[in-house]
Image (cartoon, rainbow, N blue to C red):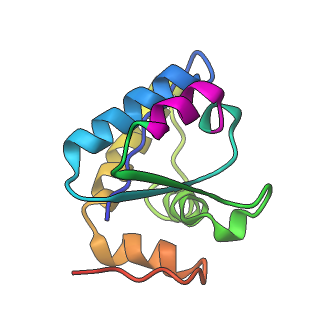
Amino acid sequence: LGWYLHFHLDRSIRQGQVIDFLRALLGHLDGPIIVVWDRLAAHRSRLLRQWLARCRRLHLEYLPGYAPELNPNEYGWAYLKGNPLANYCPQDVEHLHDRVQQAARVVADQQSLLRSFVHATHLPIRFSL
């Protein structure tokens, strides 16, 4: 189980960046991969659908239109804001970015914590060992 965060401070995410991310994910993980994500326009683009048609190992599942209670990322963000980032007052956005990245790396190494974010959704997801 992993938590991969990348910030785009100066622009929104485009379909090409989504495909680049998925390519990197395929290079990083073996076997079939299921990606569960929101309905961002870049996640549903025609270019992405065409690329996915050629990619047998990757399957996408979309969350409902607005359902933060079903999104494990929401629980991850809530944990970050309420724990390692609580009462943190950055000097500027760059310091905030660095601190969030640092805290997220620590969380990404804690399998039981990551699993708790998924379990909090009450989705019927099982983890294989």
What secondary structure prevails in the magenta region? helix
Choose between 92 and 37: the one closer to the eye: 37
x and y, in percent, of residue 38 in the image: 65, 50
Residue at (57% x, 35% y) in the render: 49
The residues colored magenta run 44-53
Classify 28 as above or below 10.
below
Residue at screen point 53% across, 30% down: 50
Residue 127 x %, y % = 34, 80
Residue 75, x across and y down, in percent: 57, 66
| Vertical relation: 19 (above or below) 79 | above
In the image, residue 43 sits, relative to residue 19, either above or below, namely: below
What is the total number of numbered labels drawn onto the structure image? 0
List x then y, in percent, for residue 104.
38, 51
Is residue 42 left or right of 4 when viewed as pictured? right
> Residue 21: which quarter of the image?
top left
In this view of the protein, which residue sits in the foreground, 126 or 83? 126
Q: Is residue 33 above or below residue 72?
A: above
- Residue 14 picture quarter: top right
Q: Which quarter shows the C terminus? A: bottom left
Q: Residue at x 54, y 58 (%)?
A: 73
**Which is nearer the eye, 41 or 86?**
41
* Residue 121 seen: yes
